[in-house]
Amino acid sequence: MDTIKKYYELQERNDKPKNTPKNNKDKIQKAIKLYKDGLTQKEIAQKLDVTEQTVLRWLKPIKKRIKIAQKNTELLHEKINNLLNENAPISEVQKVINTLEKYRLLL
């Protein structure tokens, strides 16, 4: 009886769709979007039917990029304020603003 039960359990597992790289890529992209939308790792894991550990692994690289972009954004805001206080030419301020926009795209 146990052998038959194990057979059906194995058969059931084999019938489930595999986590192929394509499926993972789609889920990773969804996880990143959900994270940027403000969901927690736990909420993302529940929505995508994966473990929190998996979400953490997927988001680790993007979190690092977001942190760097946020820091650079802060520095650029400071630079703009300094240029404005020094009455710098508008072309210099515009260059910094253009750079700032690039970092905002990463967020």
Image (cartoon, rainbow, N blue to C red):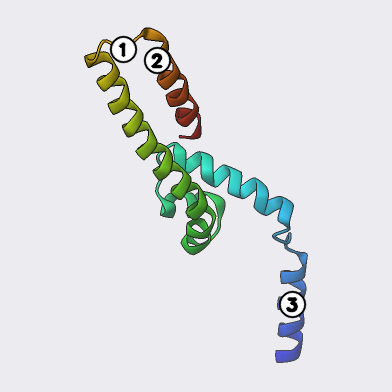
Which circle's residue, 1 or 3, is located before the other in the chain? 3
- Dot 1 crowding, Cα within 10 Å, few <14, some 14–19, many 20+: few
Look at the numbered disc 3 and give the secondary structure of its residue.
Answer: helix
Q: CA distance from mark 3 to mark 2?
A: 66 Å
Report the Cα–Cα distance between label 1 and label 2.
7 Å
Say which quarter of the image contains residue 75.
top left
Give the percent coordinates (x, y) of residue 57. Answer: 52, 59
Nearer to the camera, 2 or 89: 89
**Above or below — where is 103 with respect to 47?**
above
Residue 78's label in the rendered image is none
* Residue where numbered disc 1 is placed: 88
Residue 1 position in % (x across, y down): 73, 91
Q: Which mark is residue 92?
A: 2
Q: Which mark is residue 10?
A: 3
Question: Local crowd at mark 3 within 10 Å, few (<14), some, or many (≥20)?
Answer: few
**Amino acid bearing label 2:** Glu
Q: Hey, what amino acid is under mark 3?
A: Leu
Q: Secondary structure at mark 1?
A: loop
Q: Is residue 26 above or below residue 13?
A: above
Q: CA distance from mark 1 to mark 3?
A: 71 Å
The quarter of the displayed image where residue 77 is located: top left
